[in-house]
Amino acid sequence: MKIGITCYPTYGGSGVVATELGIALAAQGHEVHFISYALPHRLNRFVEKIYFHEVEVSNYPLFEHSLYALALTSKMVEVIEYENLDLMHVHYAIPHAMSAYLAKKVIQKSGKDIKFITTLHGTDITLVGLEPSFMPLVKFSIEESDGVTTVSRYLKEKTLTNYNIDKEIEVIYNFIDTDSYKKTDNELLRSHVAPNGEKILIHTSNFRPVKRVTDTIRILEKVKNTIPAKLVLIGDGPDRSECERLARELGLQKDVIFLGKQDGLAELLSAADLFLMPSQSESFGLSALEAMACGLPVVSSSVGGLPELVIHNETGFIAEIGDVDRMAKYSIDLLSNEKKYKNFSANSRKRSVESFDKKLILPKYIEYYEKVLGR
Ligand code: GMT
């Protein structure tokens, strides 16, 4: 098959899923054309059968605001036509699904057709998509998609109810390559971060308010009352300054280590003991899955699709949003009981391999492509 993929190319779960999917499809012999404003950050090496088409946006002085969605549409039309694509797969509804819809209409004018699939990832449905300026278009573009997938059952229900949509939606969970995401020895980082054998809590995200990163610092404060511990924060975004301020205010500036954006996550996760995900909204929780694949139990909030990933009292613990007392209690419980910790760690790895490995999820996408193409 020849597949066009559009996604946000920056750090963020939807872009990671789209890029890893493209790489996996190409490895199976499919031809993949990424269409976006920049090279997806995980596409940092030459991969056979993968092509990148950059969307350039005109900065004509009359246009006070960027016309990215339209420039993207034109690039889609060009690539669909000249590369002879079978299918477009867009990740994150806004504005990608609308651009794909428009591109399809333009292509149809020349007597051809193209099917497009929209994968909904999270805030495109639960947050920004609900804004009055977007809602009618999000609903329309979902209804007009030839296929729609969501990354959890939770997100499917939200899509159908929030937008009053009556359509078949396929749930295809996030996936991970458990051969590359696995525990490795990282004594160097461990001894650097925790020279006195402290336990290491870790969190990775884009530091948006929806991630509630400050909760991880409050959890550390409470855990430290019982167990010597450190917190490693990976990533960057709008809430980072507030987190740094809070760490200073609580006198934890030496205990909270801000590493910023990092590659080589599996190595970093391997140096830690426990993953924290206190999000306010999370349609799946790809970063929690990455941690589980490295054998880390997860303490998370109970929102969205997280209960479909984290099994309470087996691979980690789940608490109400903002209940940092309970999350700290669960963390202490796990970190102070070696036998229980080892069990949870093994369960986490096992769940990632048995339910969310790339080898299991990739065929689901391919099967869905075939279905949408009517083959
Ligand atoms: O919806 C977002 O916040 C954007 C998106 C991203 O690009 O980071 O994240 C979502 O997609 C991931 C991949 O499918 C999911 O694992 C994340 O749970 C989801 N984030 C939220 O729902 C907040």
Image (spheres, rainbow, N blue to C red):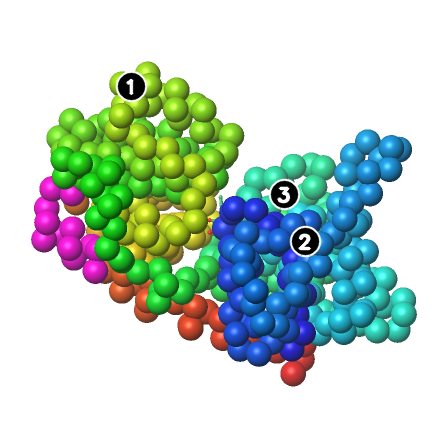
As measured in the structure, the alpha-carbon distance from the residue carrying label 2 to the one carrying label 3 is: 20 Å
Three-letter amino acid code of the residue under disc 3: Gly
Label 2: state its secondary structure: strand
Disc number at residue 129?
Answer: 3
The residue lying toward the viewer, choosing from 59 and 218, is: 59
User: How far across and how far down the image is residue 319, in percent?
Assistant: 30, 40
Question: Dot 3, crowdedness within 10 Å: few (<14), some or many (≥20)?
Answer: many
Query: From the viewer's perspective, is 256 left or right of 31?
Result: left
Question: Dot 1, crowdedness within 10 Å: few (<14), some or many (≥20)?
Answer: few
Query: From the viewer's perspective, is 52 left or right of 311?
Result: right
Label 1: state its secondary structure: loop
Nearest to N terminus: mark 2 or mark 3:
2
Quarter of image, res 300: top left
As measured in the structure, the alpha-carbon distance from the residue carrying label 3 to the one carrying label 1 is: 36 Å
User: How far across and how far down the image is residue 246, in percent?
Assistant: 36, 21
Select label 2 or label 3 by which is in front.
2
Q: Give the residue displayed 20% in from the left and 55% down from the top.
A: 344
Select label 1 or label 2 by which is in front.
2
As measured in the structure, the alpha-carbon distance from the residue carrying label 1 to the one carrying label 2 is: 42 Å
Disc number at residue 36?
Answer: 2
